[in-house]
Image: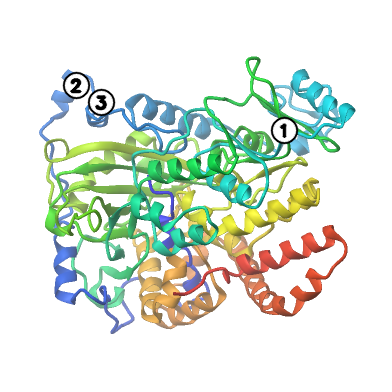
Amino acid sequence: MTTTGPRRAAAGALAALVLLGGDGSDGFVTPSSRRCRGPSHVSRTVTASLLRSTVAPTEEPASTDMTPMDEEQTGKSLTQRIMESTSSAGQAGGAGGSSTWDAFLRTEANWSRLKDFEGFDYDSMTSLPPSARHSSIPKPPQFVTDDGSQGSERCWSKLRAHAEDSTPLDYDVVVCGGTLGIFIALALQIKGLNVAVIEAGKLQGREQEWNISMKELEELVDLGVLTEEIIDEAVSTEFPGCRSGFKNSEVTPLEGGYFENGVGYECFTPGVLNLGVSPSVLINSVAKRFLERGGTVLEGTPLKGICISDSIGAAVDMGDRDEPVTAKLVLDCMGNASPISRQQRYGRKPDGVCAVVGSCAGGYEKESNLLGDIIYTNNEIQDKGPNGKLQYFWEAFPVGIGRNGNEPGSSDVKTTYMFTYMDAEKDRPSLTTLMDDYWEQLPIYQPSIQDVERDLDVKRVLFAFFPTYTDSPLKPMWSRLLAVGDASGIQSPLSFGGFGALTRHLDRISGAISEAVENDLLHKSELGEINAYTPNLSAAWMFQRAMSIRMKQNVDPKFVNRLLAVNFDQMDDMGEITIKPFLQDVVRIDGLVGSLARSFAADPTFMPQIVAHVGIPTLAEWLGHVSMIAAYDILFNMSSVIRPFVDRMDDPRERFVWRRRMEAWKFGSGNDYTFE
């Protein structure tokens, strides 16, 4: 599964329309002369031909050979039959890492439990007198403790022994979770720290490619984590770029703007998510470099808990068979299913969910398998009856072209995803329902196939759900323990998570952690400066709200497509300097303000619908975050004057805090994004 944001494109789509005004009339009332721009080195005729051949001219799904009676006789659904016919090789941990039928059933069960769960505020309940507390609510699981009377006695004994004997701790930093943690571990090892990585399973990458841009990979080269040789080995797919499109029905190619053609808008952006890289090659290469620099990898080592002494260090419990490992600092890189973040958010139901289903398969038309889709719609909001309303989005990437002698047009393999944003209410649809809709609508989206079971050679079926929280990034609850990556929620709420956010933040996070460890600035208040408030991340929350529909909410079926089509028309017209940061999860004040003004002029009657859809409190909160983006932009531009004074500060803690503030201004305003 891709780990960079397919939905990055939507970050800012709502931004350009929130200040609209008028009577809220429907229909196509505002003319526009703008057109979709294709890749500069590909003619409009060729681009239109490619897009025409990738999408069906009809909205009627093709039928499959297996009838409902056949399915009843076999006792197996289409999804089960397909999944059981694929290879189980190359399974890995993490969201989307396993693609077997059993893994799908486990994920479905987890999704069902999350929907059935009724959230509560545990912290506020514990402040009540005992007689007023709800007796049926158990205490949170004590995976992490700083209470010497709880947790592993072996861990506490080892920590006391370190203090009594004045012996050094085993490591400076222990990284829990190796899939993306190995990148952080190597960056810290390069900075001179002694680091260990603990991985519950085998440290390996999945078979499914990650999609990313060369610019993002080069950032890891600058840090010394990757080399050009590793990139050349890891990149197995390269294509010009990706389409973004938002349509009420399938019409391809599509010319003009939303109010001209009455359907929607599509555009092409070069150099975004246009590389397919092998996770296994990347992770194996980085792990090798980490070990060569003296790092330690402990595989097949499930964690049992963590004991923390503010004055001594942290001890990681690895069960009765293994001696606890001690460190000055523990990093939680275990993703959104981390037991640490679950304990910290005990009782909390996620504020939003991105649910994803898809497949990697051969059998598509080779000649048209040349470009990607980063975010695309070809239907209106779907009414799922008692399961609520959903807007389905698509994403697709060709596989196995552009590298290693594989010319464009030589591969029939591509990865396709269908995803949607929603809450985790009890009546929301199952992943099975989403998967059924995916198989049914795939021939509409990819018309070179008609019957998915007959026409496709499915290599992997992909599925996951990504819970997201408005309080991200997660502030540390304990000293000497810091969540990084997906466990902290540093990725956009519009994203599938992971690798793209890692490349963006690795330099900042590794530098801050190194400084914290070297100066013993490991109290939770100090570590909290690393996961500081970033207003552009918080602002992305209204984008997710705009693309999701609450249960029993009445909404124009064309709402999401109109919103995104108009906004992307304006951003595309403003050029790559505006649209590329948006597509890579970076919200900047210059692009935001520009797209606001232009979208208001293009569609001045949409404001009442937007306010009704997202709600006035959410809109007001979003405007507050936008104001803070502007303030952070101003503060960032003052950093060059402030930095020399900060660097001369005598107090290490004061210097550390001010450096983190300047980083927050930089990243929170999107000024970390550099233009090529």
Q: Amino acid at mark 1?
A: Asp
Of residues 166 and 332, the one drawn nearer to the viewer in this rendering: 166
Q: Which residue is mark 1?
A: 170
Q: In the rendered view of the protein, which quadrant contains the N terminus?
A: top left
Q: Residue at x 25, y 56 (%)?
A: 403
Q: Nearer the viewer, residue 515 or 399?
A: 515
CB under 8 Å between callouts 3 and 1? no
> What type is the residue that disc 3 sits on?
Glu
Closer to viewer: mark 2 or mark 1: 1
Residue 247, image quadrant? bottom left
Gap between marks 2 and 3 measured at Cα: 17 Å
Amino acid type, callout 2: Glu
Depth check, mark 3 against mark 1: the one in front is 1
Q: Secondary structure at mark 1?
A: loop
> Residue at point 14% right, 24% down?
69
Mark 1 neighbour density, 10 Å: few (under 14) some (14–19) many (20 or more): some
Q: CA distance from mark 3 to mark 1?
A: 45 Å
Question: Is 299 drawn above or below residue 329 in the view shown?
Answer: above
Number of the label disc, if any, that sits on residue 72:
2
* Place of residue 215 in the rendered image (x, y in percent of width and height, measured from the top left): 43, 65
Residue 492 visible in the snapshot? no
Against 496, residue 35 (above or below) is: below
**Going from the N terminus, do you reach mark 3 or mark 1 first?**
3
* Most distant residue in the top direction: 320
